[in-house]
Amino acid sequence: MGKTPHILICDDDPVIHESLGLYLKAERFDFSSAYDGEQALSMNESVQPDLIILDLMMPKISGTDVCREIRRFSSVPIIMLTAKGEEIDRVLGLELGADDYIVKPFSPREVIARIKAVLRRLGEKTQQGRSILRFDGLEINISCPNVKKGGVAFGTVPEMAAAVTRAVRESTHLPVIVKLSPNVTDIVTMAKVVEDNGAHAISLINTLIGMAIDVRTRRPKLGNIIGGLSGPAIKPVALRMVWQVASAVRVPVIGIGGIGTAEDAVEFLLAGATAVQVGTANFYNPSAVCEILTGIQKYLLEQGEQSVQSIIGTLRLEG
């Protein structure tokens, strides 16, 4: 069964929220409410709705400005709901990126029908009615060293990292995690660039660039000559960079690099990582993730901590 669609209602009239809310509940939709333009923008970021119902005449920030701002970074479906029925207003809303337009007074049943139609058109269901794959977020790897054309440059040139991050944000309403390369002079600069261009979270590090040579044939052991070095050897570099980035950005940081034990994972959490990824360890120890989870729980009990959140970023630098 697919995820229940979440609808964000943005209107300054409580009656609208109440009437639409009753119909949305009856149709098994989840929904949230925003009563002015500022709330609409804030809740779009925090809730990540599947569709927005947006009043054109919102307090604080107008519906047109809200739509314009959302379209800078997101393709979430928007249905304009307004008392202004003039042709120029409908055209403006649609040109700003609205997917549909309904004029007040309206029938809640019609609104629900239009919501379903928009979601259906945008791939919520196939024509046969079968659920298709849905994703809760996207991790964008801008640092792959194994791609000959652009694989390294995307993650090492700030302007290219900014452009890729911005393009992805403009193409989806899903949370976007950007994976950074360690093969840069200043990792903090790269982290701030992707944060400023819309990344919801940052993961680091990807592999270090390495090389191996067969001394008997005198040829590179890797088909691409160079490739990514991962595993325990890169952990100290990864830990240092996670600490630097977590201290400099506001978005969550996901620690990656050489994590094979619970103690490794705890080190990253103490350095400021909100979460960790386990990669290479799964190849030599298929039970690694389960053992790491158990080990973290044991550590929390030993330290008298109630949750993982209580140890994030608690590295002691003095004394």
Image (cartoon, rainbow, N blue to C red):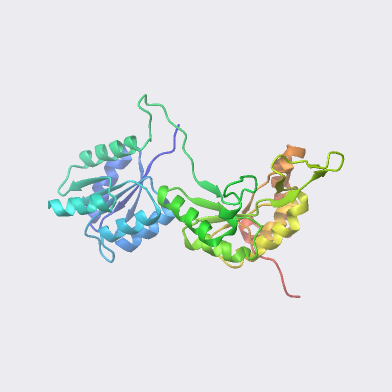
Q: Which residue is at the far front?
A: 218
| Residue 252 rendering spot, x and y as whole percentages | 56, 58
> Which image quadrant is residue 28 in?
top left
Q: Which residue is at the far top?
A: 128
Q: Which residue is at the far right?
A: 216
Is 30 positioned to the left or the right of 302 in the image? left
The front one of 2 and 250 is 250
Q: Residue at x 55, y 53 (%)?
A: 178
The front one of 108 and 138 is 138
Is 184 located above or below residue 108 in the figure? below
Q: Residue at x 52, y 57 (%)?
A: 160
The front one of 14 and 256 is 256
| Residue 180 rendering spot, x and y as whole percentages | 60, 55
Q: Quadrant of the C terminus?
A: bottom right
Q: Residue at x 72, y 44 (%)?
A: 225
Q: Quadrant of the N terminus?
A: top left
The total number of labels drawn is 0
> Which image quadrant is residue 318 in?
bottom right
| Residue 270 rendering spot, x and y as whole percentages | 68, 61
Query: Can residue 85 be spotted in the picture?
Result: no
Q: Residue at x 47, y 56 (%)?
A: 163
Is 83 positioned to the left or the right of 294 in the image? left
Is 85 positioned to the left or the right of 124 in the image? left
Query: Can residue 155 be spotted in the picture?
Result: yes
| Residue 168 rendering spot, x and y as whole percentages | 46, 50
Q: Which residue is at the far bottom?
A: 319
